[in-house]
């Protein structure tokens, strides 16, 4: 912690200053320029896109499905980089790339986005298979072997972090659904004549053949029969 109680997180930044990774948790990011190049579009376009994503309402937005979990959230990755560069969190970068590759209308650099999205998807699948087979990649700098347990923990943490906004959105939906009035169970319109009297719900009427007719069925038949009458008779009888 610093003297101002503002936590400074160490970051590993690539030489070209386009990418970084926080040492404390492995969360990574890229600059707006790098993301715009990844998507095959202009930097200004991505900046406006990210601002609209940040300012969108988490519930009432009309964003593409891949972007909805990030609506209303800050997309910046906090580091101790002294150059003042803004890094976008890797999860947001992936969602933006997916949108430009799969959802956006055709534009000049769309094929670049498609190619990069395929590359990222392959890399993600490779890391998943590593976690299943126990493969341990070596660091190019330290040559330290990552254990299977460490790799599994890293993958699990990344998946949990990716699912957090989705789970929050599902909780909001569940809260809305719980506030809705519960629908009454649909009753059968008819019951056979051998139905024990104690099992016949209240309001059912018994017919000549011994079967039972529900109030809903009775009202439906009554409405149908009224509709078959001439309109002037229905008007006099104040039917319907």
Image (spheres, rainbow, N blue to C red):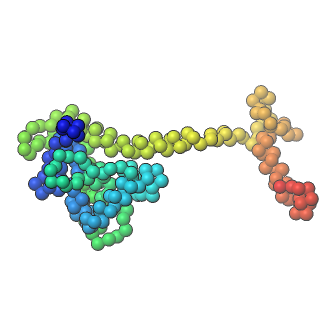
- The correct choice, above or below, for 202 with respect to 35 in the image is above
Who's the residue at 23% across and 37% down the image?
A: 5
Q: Quadrant of residue 67?
A: bottom left
The answer, for residue 38, to whether it is visible in the render is: no
Residue at 31% in and 41% down: 161
**In this rendering, position of residue 20 left or right of residue 58:** left
Q: Determine the image quadrant of residue 163.
A: top left
In-image side of 50 versus 133 (left or right): right
Pick the front one: 34 or 212: 34
Kindly give the residue lying farthest to the top in the view shown.
198
Quadrant where the C terminus sits is bottom right
Location of residue 182 by image quarter = top right
Query: In the current view of this chain or complex, which residue is farthest to the bottom?
Result: 108
Residue 146 vs residue 90: left or right?
Answer: left
Q: Position of residue 74 (x, y in %)?
A: 32, 50
Estimate the x, y position of residue 31 in percent, counting from the top left.
22, 56
Q: Viewer-proximal residue, 235 or 85?
A: 85
The image shows a total of numbered marks equal to: 0
Picture coordinates of residue 191, whole percent (x, y):
76, 38
Q: Residue at x 71, y 40 (%)?
A: 187
Identify the image quadrant of the N terminus.
top left
Q: At which x and y percent is residue 219?
A: 80, 47
In front of the other: 134 or 215: 215
In the rendered image, the vertical position of residue 76 relative to residue 214, given as above or below:
below
Q: Residue furthest front?
A: 4
Q: Is residue 92 visible?
A: yes
Q: In the image, what residue occupies the spot 16% across and 49% down?
A: 81
């Amino acid at each position: 912690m610093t003297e101002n109680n503002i936590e400074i997180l160490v970051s590993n930044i690539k030489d070209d200053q386009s990418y970084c990774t926080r040492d404390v948790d492995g969360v990574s990011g890229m600059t707006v320029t790098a993301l715009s190049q990844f998507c095959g579009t202009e930097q200004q376009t991505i900046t406006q896109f990210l601002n609209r994503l940040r300012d969108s309402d988490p519930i009432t937005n009309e964003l593409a499905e891949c972007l909805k979990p990030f609506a209303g959230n800050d997309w910046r990755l906090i580091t101790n980089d002294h150059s003042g560069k803004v890094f976008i969190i890797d999860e947001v970068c992936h969602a933006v790339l997916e949108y430009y590759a799969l959802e956006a209308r055709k534009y000049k650099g769309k094929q670049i986005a498609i190619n990069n999205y395929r590359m990222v998807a392959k890399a993600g699948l490779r890391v998943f298979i590593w976690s299943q087979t126990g493969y341990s990649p070596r660091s190019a700098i330290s040559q330290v072997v990552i254990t299977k347990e460490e790799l599994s923990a890293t993958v699990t943490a990344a998946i949990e972090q990716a699912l957090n906004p989705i789970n929050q959105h599902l909780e909001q939906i569940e809260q809305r659904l719980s506030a809705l009035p519960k629908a009454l169970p649909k009753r059968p319109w008819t019951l056979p004549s051998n139905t024990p009297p104690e099992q016949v719900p209240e309001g059912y009427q018994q017919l000549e053949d011994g079967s039972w007719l529900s109030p809903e069925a009775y009202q439906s038949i009554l409405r149908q029969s009224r509709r078959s009458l001439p309109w002037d008779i229905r008007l006099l009888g104040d039917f319907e």
